[in-house]
Amino acid sequence: MSKDSHRRKKVQICSTSPGYPVYCPKCNSTNVLIFYDPRFTPRLQSRWDDLIDEKRILLENRWEKIKDENRWGKLEKGSEKPNWICKDCYDGGIVVEQPIDKKISDEFKKCEKEFTEKSEPLYWDKCGEKVTLKQIHGESNIGDNSLALIAVTRQQCNTDNFAKYREYIKNTLAKNTLYYGLWYNTDNGKVEYDILYSIENNLQEIQKHLNLHNQINNGVTQKMALIIDKDGSWKIQSNESYSQTTSNSLGGI
Ligand SMILES: [Zn+2]
């Protein structure tokens, strides 16, 4: 027995099951196993477990992309990636991170094509998975009360500044909810990209929050909030100071 095969025998491969279908890029089978090499930095493994949970991964099998990976002696510390193997076609490779903005952007572009002024707004959760308003309400654990969704973005048509808005919700507003939305703005005939968070449905709170985000939006205030009932039905709550400013400025003309 050679020294190498002896060593291989002792090695324990740590594999993980994502809990949702992951498709082999070669044969489209879902019989795919993701695993960590024993030399994988344990600290990094939990980060990858999170990315896998959040469906933020892509399976890579192109040789030019994977040829430098798994050369464990030469790898830069911290840059290692999990591996995958398809149990049907025996193709395999590495798992790479799918940036959230790319995922959202792809989803938006797909849905945007069929959007008209009659389209209902669409929503995605923080992992870029589509959610219904009823699901958003359910996640908020507020029972029978209704919920308010407030956008921090204004008239945005790309994902360029999404990182800035996400940070703002988390750090400045200290809110732990985050949703992505696509809706048709009938005012200008454009499909807009939104980042939103939820608060309790309280008129005073809603008005306060609608006027909180002017600074991050070049002084432009939020126009409305979306009120969601527990059955998923919704209505618009306008920003009182927005209509006031508008009529004031109109009156000034
Ligand atoms: Zn396969």
Image: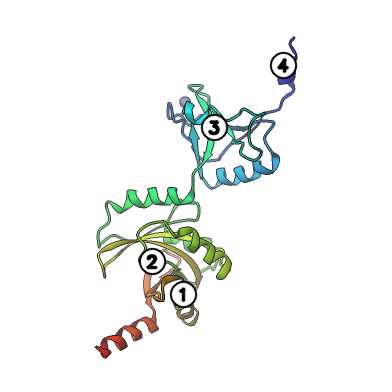
Q: Measure the alpha-carbon separation of dots 2 and 4.
A: 63 Å
Residue occupying image coordinates x 27% and y 52%: 114
Amino acid type, residue under disc 2 in the picture? Ser
The quarter of the picture where the C terminus appears is bottom left
Disc nearer the start of the sequence (3/4): 4
Q: Measure the alpha-carbon separation of dots 1 and 2.
A: 31 Å
Instruction: Give the residue at mark 3.
Output: 94
The quarter of the picture where the N terminus appears is top right
Disc nearer the start of the sequence (2/4): 4
Q: Where in the figure is residue 133, as x and y percent of width and height?
A: 42, 61
Asked if residue 30 lies left or right of residue 244, the reply is: right
Residue 215: mark in rendering: 1
Amino acid type, residue under disc 3 in the picture? Ile
Disc nearer the start of the sequence (3/1): 3
Element carrying mark 1: helix
Farthest residue, direction top: 1
In the displayed structure, 170 sits above or below 64; it is below
**159, 6: nearer the viewer:** 159
Asked if residue 33 lies left or right of residue 30, the reply is: right
Residue 172: mark in rendering: none
Instruction: Give the residue at mark 2.
Output: 233
